[in-house]
Image (cartoon, rainbow, N blue to C red):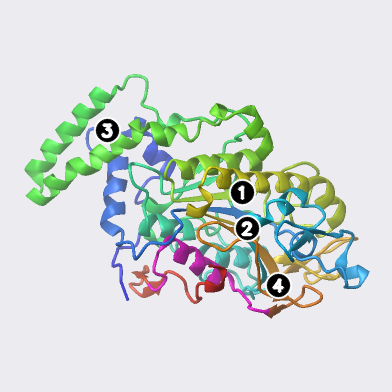
Amino acid sequence: MFSIHGSAGRMCDIASRRELLTVGGLSLIGLSLPTFLRQRTVQAASTVGRGTAESVILLYLQGSPSHIDLYDPKPSAPAEIRGEFQPIATRAPGMFLGEVLPLLADQAQHFTLIRSMSVKPKGLRNHGSAIYMLMTGTDPANFSSTGLAVPPSRDDLPSVGSIVARQRPSVSSGLSYVAVCGPVKEGKEVGVGQSAGILGAAYDPFTMYDDPTQPLKLEAFALPGDMTLDRLQSRVDLRANIDRQRDSAKSAATFDTYYERALGLVQSHRAVQAFRLHEESDALRDRYGRTRFGQSCLLARRLVEAGTRFVQVTWPARSDDEPVPGPDGSWDTHRNNFPTLREHRCPYFDRTLSGLISDLAERGLLETTLVVAVGEFGRSPKIGVATTDNVGPGGRDHWPECYSCLIAGGGVRPGQVYGESDRFGAWPKSNPVHPFDLITTIYHALGIDPATEYHDSLNRPRRLVEQGQPVLGLF
C-alpha cells in the first residue's frame, strides 16, 4: 500500500485557485501561483499504473432526475409507478430509455447504463449527505444528525476532482481540476464536497461559473495593465537571487522550475484558448444547446482537449430548488414531475449530453475521456407518495435505494446495461453499485490505485475511497 504523508491545509493557508491564477497579485516578496505549483508537486504521489482514461468529465445533476422516467422504464408496472412516458428503443440492442431522451437513444452505442446504483445516506433522505458521499467517497461524519449539509471547511475530506488533481496532475502547465456551470448547492450551503478539504487549497478546483452563453471573462489569466512579461520575469529573477542566498542549494535548484511553470501557465495559449467558446462554429454550439449547461459541456470538451484532467459540470439549479420552467431549473421534482421533465428538463439535457458524447466520439476523444452523468440519488417509484413529507400531485420523492448512472468512454464497454433493478425500480435486483464503487471505478479508469493513502488533520491514514471496489464488469 502506497502512503502519502502531507500536512493538512487550513482555510486561509493559500488563496483560491482563481486568486492564484490572477498574477496581478504577484509581488516582490512572493508569488502565490508558484507557491501553489511547488506545493502541488511536493505533495503529489506517483501515478500508479495507467488506464485508458486520461481525463474525466463529471456531469453532476444536482437535485436528482427520475431514473424510472429517463433511464430505467417500467412499462409492465402499475400506472402509479410506470408513469406517463413510454419506453423507446435505442441503438444498443436491448436497451430502452424513456421517450423524453430520443437523441440519447440514437447515441446508445457509445454509452453504458448502470441501473443498480444504491446508497443509504446518513440521517434523513436529504440531499446533503448523499451529495457528500458521491463527491468524496466517504461518509459525512461532520453532517448534522438529519443529514443536512454544514458549511464546507478545511476539515472536509477531499473531493474526487481534488484527488485526481493530486494523483494525476495535468502536464504542460495545464489545469488539473476545473469546475464549471455552477457550484454544488444544498440548502444555504455552497460548495458541498467540491474542494480539496484537508489537502489544502492547492488542489481546489479552478472555478468558472460565468454564464458560458456569454463571452467568458479571462482576467484570471491576464497581467495587470502596467505589468509586462519582461517585468514579471525580472521580479522572478530577483526572487530567485534572494532565495539562493537564503536557502539551500536544493531550494535554489528547484526554484526556477516552479516559477517557469507559473509563467508558462500565464502565457499558455492552450490553457486560455479552451475558454474561447466563440471560436467554435455556430452549428456546433447549437448542437450542444445554447443553455448554461449546454455551453458548459462544450467548455468541458475543450478543456479536456487542452489537457485538463478533471472537469466537473454541475447542473446550475440548487439540489433542493423548486423546479421552474426553462433550461436551468432543478431536477428535484417533488411536484409535477412529468410536465417538468417533458417540457423543461429533458429536452435540454437530451440535446446536451447526446451532443457531448457524439462530439467526443467524432474527435477520437471518447476512448481517453470518461464521461459520468449522475445525480445524488433517484426518485420514488410510486408517484405522489412521500418519503420525506414533501411531495405533491404528480411528484416523485427522494429515492436513494435504487437509481441509474450513465457512463461512457475511458475504456468502458459501450452499449450495455450493467445491473438491474426490480420490477418497480425500487431496489437493485442484481449487481448493486454503491457511489463509493463508482468513484473507485473513476480512479481505476485513470490508473489511480484506490488503495493509496493520505493522512488527515489528526494524522490518521485514510484511503482515497472509504470502501468500494471498481466495477470491472463495465470494462
Above or below residue 342? Residue 148 is below
* Element marked by disc 2: strand
Q: Are marks 1 and 2 in contact (CB under 8 Å)?
A: yes
Q: Which residue is mark 1?
A: 357
Q: Which residue is mark 2?
A: 111
Question: Where does the image place residue 167, in percent across and percent down from the top left?
Answer: 36, 59
Tell me which numbered mark, 1 or 3, is placed earlier along the sequence.
3
How far apart marks 4 and 3 lie (CA) works out to 53 Å
The residue located at (81%, 75%) in the rendering is 424
Badge 3 amino acid: Ser
In this view, the mark in front (4 or 2): 2
Position of 350 relative to 289 (above/below)? below
Q: Which residues are magenta?
A: 430-451
The first of marks 1 and 4 along the sequence is: 1
Identity, as a three-letter code, of the amino acid under mark 1: Ile
Residue 331, located in which quarter of the rendered image?
bottom right
Res 27 label = 3
Q: Most extreme residue toward the top, as rendered?
A: 226
**For the residue labelled by badge 1, is the local secondary structure a helix, a strand or a loop?**
helix
Label 4: which residue?
402
